[in-house]
Image: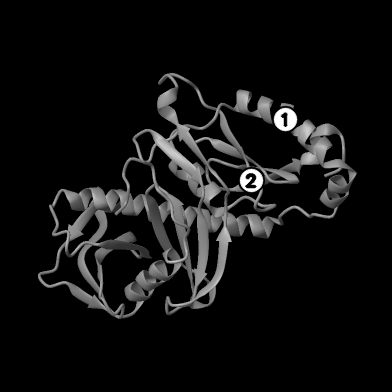
Amino acid sequence: MPNRSFRARALSFQVATALAFAILPHAIEAQGAAATAAAASVPPATPSQLADITDRGRALAGYQRAAWRAYSRLLATKPDPRLVQRYIAYRADSGWVVAFGRLSVTRDTFYVSNVAIPAVVGGSRSDTLFDIETPTTPGADTDFLVRAARAIDTATALFWPSGRPYETAVLPAAGGSWWVYVIPAANRAGVWPLGDDMRFRVSGDGRTILEARRMHVGIIEYDRTLRPEDTRYTAGVHNTVTSEVPEDTDVYHVLTRQPRVFEYVFTPHFLYMVNEDGTIRFVLGRGTLIGTSP
């Protein structure tokens, strides 16, 4: 079930950037001339690539926000836990809709116990308030929802064991396949975790892994509770070693944490900025920071 205690803080821009600039020259110097030559051959992400990352990150953020809010509303109705074992969010004409239910033992049917739809507020659909519809008999879905639920099962079966809670999201991908995300959930109020997450591409029937991508190594907890309430946050910053581009979950993290501030992402050779609206901007090559070519 969605974890509703996601909270976090962004790192102070002034402190974090100062640390990054202080450490970076020593790290690059230690890599030597070979690393500098390799850096020159690595191209930064194209605008099209960055736009695709933004789109996936925005969709992931919308999915999770809808799931958290819908589940909070559902809990107030005291649902039967035997019928509500998982959730699938999807976009409809009315906005994000969340279907709650259970997957059959044979994994060929998804029984829908409750559906959360955006409530009508002031004549228009709200993206923060949900109405819960509960059919007399759970509806049996044998297409979209069951394939999405199977895709989650297939992906999570390959996810490495962990002692902390995780959340999942499944989004349609090109060619009828699925993107399945496994991301850390907050284990206490006031914290937004970033890292130790994976993205899988799963076949349209939800049975086969087509691609597995580990997006971050290690985890950072942005803990807003460690700072006074009146502390002003300007930006966050983190390093990644798994890729030369920001990740979908970097965008998701910026769009869901509070306060919402932009994030600097240092890859091995480049610096990017994820804006508050999820768009991504290439800033410069990391080598440029110490007067060398990226």
- Evaluate whether residue 94 shows in this view: no
Residue type (three-letter) at the residue carrying disc 1: Ile
Q: Which residue is mark 1?
A: 23
Q: Could you say which quadrant of the image residue 20 lies in?
A: top right
Residue at point 35% right, 65% down? 93
- Which quadrant: the C terminus? top right
Residue type (three-letter) at the residue carrying disc 2: Thr
Q: Secondary structure at mark 1?
A: helix
Q: Earlier in the sequence, mark 2 or mark 1?
A: 1
- Which quadrant: the N terminus? bottom left
In percent of width and height, residue 219 lies at: 52, 42
Mark 2 to mark 1: distance in Å?
Answer: 15 Å
The residue nearer to you, when weighing 85 against 252, is 85
Q: Residues within 10 Å of mark 2 (few under 14, many from 20)?
A: some
Residue at point 43% right, 35% down? 8
Label at residue 240 = 2
Residue at point 53% right, 40% down? 276
In screen coordinates, is 190 left or right of 45?
Answer: left
In percent of width and height, residue 3 lies at: 32, 47
Q: Secondary structure at mark 2?
A: loop
